[in-house]
Structure formats: C-alpha cells, structure tokens
Image (cartoon, grey):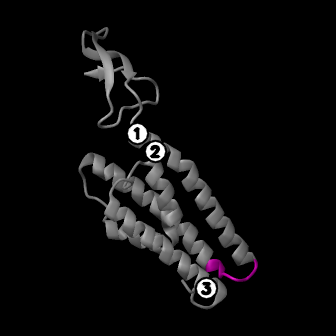
Amino acid sequence: MRANVPRGRIPVPGQVVTFQADRDDRNRLRASDVHYVGLSHRRTQIARGLPVASVVAVVFFGLLGVLAVLGLLPGVAVALSVLSSVAAFVLYRTDKAAAARGAWRVSESTLHLVSLLGGWPGALIAQRVYHHKTRKQPFQTVFRITVVLNCAALAYLAIGQPIQL
C-alpha cells in the first residue's frame, strides 16, 4: 500500500497514525488523509538534542582552536579530532543504513575507538541526526567514558600534567 504522508514526515516505528484507505488513479490501494496522533516522545527528545549536540561540538572545536593558537595543544591533535569526527559521522551513517537493510554492521568497538580518538563530537551529532544508538544505554555509557577520556588526554597535552579529579 502506498501512503500519502505529509511532506518530510515519515512515521517512525511505534508512532500512531490515522488514515483513510483509498485507491489511486491506477486503482492501487493507498493511504490518504494521513494524520499523526501526537508526536513520538523519542523523536521529540532526539530533535531537541541536535541543537545541544551542535553547540557542544562548536564550543569543543573552538576551544581546541584557541589552545592550538596559544601553542598549548599540537595542531596534529586538532586535526586528528576533526578527521575523527568526520569519520565518526560517516561510520554512524553507514551503520544506520546497514541496520535498515539488515546488512553487515559497523562494530560498536569501532564506533567507540573513533570517539576515543577525538571523533566524539561528530559521533554526538550523528547520533542525533540519524537517531542511532541513542537509546541503547550500555552503548551510551561507554560513549560517555570515551568522551571523558579524550578530553582528559587533551587536557594533559595542553597543561602537561595529569588532571586531579
């Protein structure tokens, strides 16, 4: 059955919609007059997370840039973080597409390694853009640990001594 859904609003699994069964000009069954019954709580929360994730990434890269200009952080560390973020974003997109097709997936350890190497800002944004790996709590716990470890390593590089917690 084909559906005539509102432009740009594809329903997500679990979201309730109402519709009228109809026939198109070639007498094929289709859904028309599609209406969403409330917004999915999950979709609303993730959509709210994208602006926050974007601000976090911009502030993080801004701070890295300032530290590099001041000579407190090697430029290669900034470059590695930017490249890792781009790689993380692409890997999340690839994994999400593979999950939808039922194809070979990117391993969670690979996603975490790229985050640990500085790609966590790209991973954070990709999680919100692709609605991927946001509800899997064990994954999120390890992801947060990679963020803390990466930031601690960068702080160590910048100030030359371990951070006292």
Q: Residues within 10 Å of mark 2 (few under 14, many from 20)?
A: few
Which callout, 1 or 3, points to the residue nearer the camera?
1
Q: Amino acid at mark 2?
A: Gln
Per the rendered image, the range of residues in magenta is: 70-76
Is residue 84 one of those drawn in magenta?
no
Examine the rendered structure and indicate whether residue 25 appears above or below residue 109. Answer: above
Residue 112 place in picture, x, y as percent: 39, 69
Q: Which residue lies at the image location 34% right of the left edge and 49% below the top edge? A: 97
Marks 2 and 3, how far apart at CA: 35 Å
Q: Which residue lies at the image location 53% right of the left edge and 63% below the top edge? A: 121
- Identity of the residue furthest to the right in this view: 70
**Label for residue 41?**
1
Q: Amino acid at mark 3?
A: Leu
17 left or right of 79 in image: left
Front-most of 39 and 77? 39
Q: Amino acid at mark 1?
A: His
Residue at numbered disc 3? 157
Q: Which residue lies at the image location 73% right of the left edge and 82% below the top edge? A: 71
Main secondary structure of the magenta stretch: loop
Marks 2 and 1, how far apart at CA: 6 Å
Which callout, 2 or 3, points to the residue nearer the camera?
2
Marks 1 and 3, how far apart at CA: 41 Å
Front-most of 69 and 128? 128
Marks 1/3 in contact by CB < 8 Å: the verdict is: no
Residue 29 place in picture, x, y as percent: 24, 15
Q: Residues within 10 Å of mark 3 (few under 14, many from 20)?
A: some
